[in-house]
Amino acid sequence: MTTKSSMKSQTSLPMKRYSSSMAENPHLIEFPTSPQPAAVGEEITHYSHSKHPLTEVTLNELFTCSGCKEYGAGKRFSCQECEFQLHEFCAFAPPLLKNHQLHGQHQLVFHSKPKPAKAGISWPRCNICGKSTKGFAFRCRACSFQMHPCCAMLSTEINFPPHPHLLRLLPPLSTNNDLACGECNKRRPGRMYHCTVCDYHLHAACAKALYNGLRETGIPLPDPRPNAIEKAARLASQVVIEFIGGLIEGLGEGMGGALIDNIARGRCISRRRMQE
């Protein structure tokens, strides 16, 4: 990634220069124990979207980051020619994290491409928030650990206003899933923080709102839980996909492909009739 003044020196790495002076560069993104990026200009060129420049904008609306594929709000780097947008911490993610508080035993390498989904359906999950990793991520080469860029902004101890006490990250135990979060009042996979004074608990997934702009703007996340009809439709679609896959293997690619084309053509006709 380069600023506008250094576009000619682009490489494939997400970071190009580092600075040690927070006072001189007020827009620095500070990952825990990580190198510091260069100053942010009003316009940058990012290696993941080199055909258009990205402009720093602040909008009080929800967006999906084109890098990590997660939600954000407020400040972002946005393409004025298309729909490409990046979180600030995704735009300035360093190529390497050393001695990170959440995985200090190994170095973490930045990857712009996700690990492939298992069977094309189940995406690998972040070891911190428990959510799928579908884009930018930091991954360990020595073990299977990985986390989102936003999760890399977290540390072992945080303050989460308006809760008045310090919160400390719990070990990655399965029993954490049985604890209700004080922010969303739900139970879910992923790491949790606990209060050092009272019985308050907080999902790491909810703590990410401190950095992705959602807490600052007050914008809630869309409810990810599908209703009963959506669950049934998803299950039925999976059965159909597996059935067609078996037919393709039995009939051969030629006849199987023709069958899929006919099914797709029939769906298009049905949709047009419904719209009429």
Image (spheres, grey):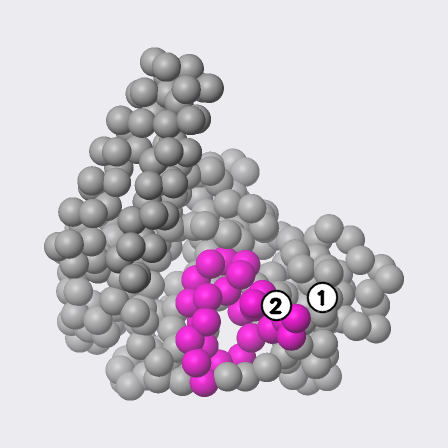
Q: Which range is magenta?
A: 60-87
Q: In the depicted view, which residue is nearer to us: 78 or 196? A: 78
Would residue 22 be seen by someone viewing this image from the given angle? no
The residue depicted at 72 percent of the width and 69 percent of the height is 53
Q: Of helix, strand and loop, which one carries label 1? A: loop
The quadrant the N terminus occupies is bottom right
On screen, residue 261 versus residue 34, left or right, reads: left
Nearer the camera: disc 2 or disc 1: 2
239 inside magenta stretch:
no
Q: In the depicted view, which residue is nearer to us: 183 or 72? A: 72
Q: Which callout, 2 or 1, points at the residue further toward the start of the chain?
A: 1
Disc on res. 82: 2
* Number of dots carrying numbers: 2
Label pair 2/1, CB-CB below 8 angstroms: yes
On screen, residue 199 versus residue 190, left or right, reads: left
Would residue 232 be seen by someone viewing this image from the given angle? yes
Q: In the depicted view, which residue is nearer to us: 153 or 120? A: 120
Q: Which residue is mark 1?
A: 52
The residue depicted at 68 percent of the width and 68 percent of the height is 37
67 inside magenta stretch:
yes
The amino acid beneath tag 2 is Cys
Q: Position of residue 115 (x, y in %)?
A: 48, 40
Q: Position of residue 258 (x, y in %)?
A: 42, 26
The residue depicted at 37 percent of the width and 33 percent of the height is 262
